[in-house]
Image (tube, rainbow, N blue to C red):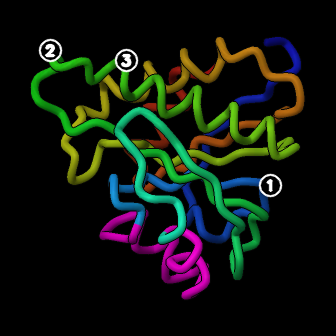
Amino acid sequence: MAGLRLRALQADITTLAVDAIVNAANASLLGGGGVDGAIHRAAGPQLLRACRTLGGCPAGQARITPGFRLPARHVIHAVGPIWRGGGDGEPELLAGCYRNSLALAEEAGCTSVAFPSISTGVYGYPADLAAPLAVHTVAAFPARRVREVVFCCFSTNDLERYRSLLP
């Protein structure tokens, strides 16, 4: 969409002052390692309490909570697929994470959203496949309220990968 600005930056997602950050969560939504653990630590114990009320989340879906102690007003918990070679519906599930997260952001009135690279850590989704899928899915989303999407990259390699895909 012409009004949707996409950009990539290398940063700690927990420090971003956006309306919503997306958490690469596990199905329990009760915290874990990587981005998930960092977000739970930065948001404080209220995040875990809020997540306990959600009853988990299947792969490809997302849930929303307040951001608590984070600069972001909301945390959108997206559960990515575990990579099993690509033949188990992983691309569709990963695209669903991005679409469902943006839909929740729209419903919450968010204008800015930051995504990590969902499923590319311990879930093993190849970053060279995940990044173009993420950019394409976000760019194709019919945003009404969301005006800016940030792909928050952990490494310089990730940053270069995303920047090469952005217009």
| Screen quadrant of the N terminus | top right
Chain-order first, disc 3 or disc 1: 1
Chain-order first, disc 2 or disc 3: 2
Magenta region, main secondary structure: helix
Chain-order first, disc 2 or disc 1: 1
Q: Disc 2 on helix, strand or loop?
A: loop
Residue, disc 2:
87
Structural distance between the alpha carbons of marks 3 and 1: 26 Å
- Residue placed farthest to the bottom in the image? 45
Q: Is residue 165 above or below residue 102?
A: above
Instruction: Pick whichever, 29 or 1, lies toward us.
Output: 29
Structural distance between the alpha carbons of marks 2 and 3: 10 Å
Q: Disc 1 on helix, strand or loop?
A: loop
Neighbour class for label 3 at 10 Å: few (<14), some, many (≥20)?
few
Q: Position of residue 48 (x, y in %)?
A: 50, 77
The verdict on residue 110 being magenta is no
The verdict on residue 40 being magenta is yes
Residue drawn at (58%, 41%) of the image: 151
Q: Which residues are magenta?
A: 30-51
Amino acid on which the number 1 mark rests in the picture = Asp
Q: Which mark is residue 92?
A: 3
Q: Position of residue 158 (x, y in %)?
A: 41, 42
